[in-house]
């Protein structure tokens, strides 16, 4: 696995933001995936994160576009990178049903599609909707 794929997986699993959940649920349900089977950060990842997990997105599959926030740095006079904020970047996420195992690949973590009963027990009964004011105050926090 490449370092880039490992970093993509770490970013996906360590983030606490739920800002994209609405878009993920709406987009994947429009593709025919039932809502109880959609669990972001469990069975919904980016292309590179799936590669790190030993799975390949099938050719021709279309994912859901979401916006992420990438930290920006600027080198100071000593050449040390200093954080200066974050910028938006769009990426695409895919459900596990849109992937196949890579033959002979060793996954860094085992991912299996949870049974619908497991999803219902682990997922909250209702998704929290974020108002635009809450979303932007969270995303544009100065460093």
Image (cartoon, rainbow, N blue to C red):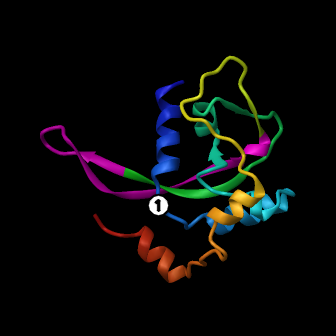
Is residue 92 inside the magenta stretch? yes
Give coordinates of residue 4: x percent, y percent. Answer: 49, 32
- Give the SS element for disc 1: loop
| Quadrant containing the C terminus in the rendered view | bottom left
Packing grade of label 1 (10 A; few <14, some 14-19, many >=20) is few
Furthest residue toward top: 104
Can you say which quadrant of the picture contains the N terminus? top right
Image x and y of residue 45, in percent: 63, 46
Q: Where is residue 127 in the image (x, y as percent from the top left)?
A: 64, 74
Which stretch appears magenta? 72-98
Residue 76 in magenta? yes
Q: Percent position (x, y) of residue 46?
A: 62, 44
Please name the residue shown 27% across and 52% down the image. 83
Decide if residue 6 is on the left or right side of residue 115: left
Front in this rendered view, residue 65 or 130: 130
Q: Give the residue displayed 82% in from the left and 56% down from the top.
A: 33
Q: Which of 10 and 39 is in front in this view?
A: 39
For this rendering, which residue is in front, 76 or 102?
102
Q: At x 18% / y 37%, what residue is drawn? A: 79
> How many numbered marks have been drawn onto this rendered protein structure?
1
Task: Tell me the residue that label 1 is attached to.
Answer: 16
The answer to which of 106 and 83 lies nearer the viewer is 106
Say above or below: 143 vs 57: below
Q: Which residue is pictured at 78% across the width and 46% down the height? A: 62
Q: Answer left or right for 78 relative to 115.
A: left
Farthest left residue?
78
Q: Is the magenta stretch mostly helix, strand or loop?
A: strand
Above or below for 129 versus 33: below
């Amino acid at each position: 696995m490449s370092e880039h794929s490992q970093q993509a997986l770490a970013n996906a699993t360590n983030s606490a933001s739920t800002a994209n959940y609405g878009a993920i649920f709406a987009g994947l349900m429009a593709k025919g995936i039932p809502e109880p089977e959609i669990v972001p950060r469990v069975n919904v990842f980016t292309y590179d994160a799936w590669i790190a997990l030993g799975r390949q997105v099938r050719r021709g599959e279309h994912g859901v576009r979401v916006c992420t926030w990438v930290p920006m740095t600027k080198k100071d006079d000593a050449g040390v990178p200093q954080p200066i904020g974050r910028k938006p970047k769009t990426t695409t996420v895919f459900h596990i049903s849109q992937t196949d195992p890579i033959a002979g690949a060793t996954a860094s973590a085992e991912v299996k599609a949870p049974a619908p009963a497991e999803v219902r027990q682990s997922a909250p009964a209702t998704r929290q909707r974020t108002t635009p004011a809450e979303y932007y105050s969270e995303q544009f926090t100065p460093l």
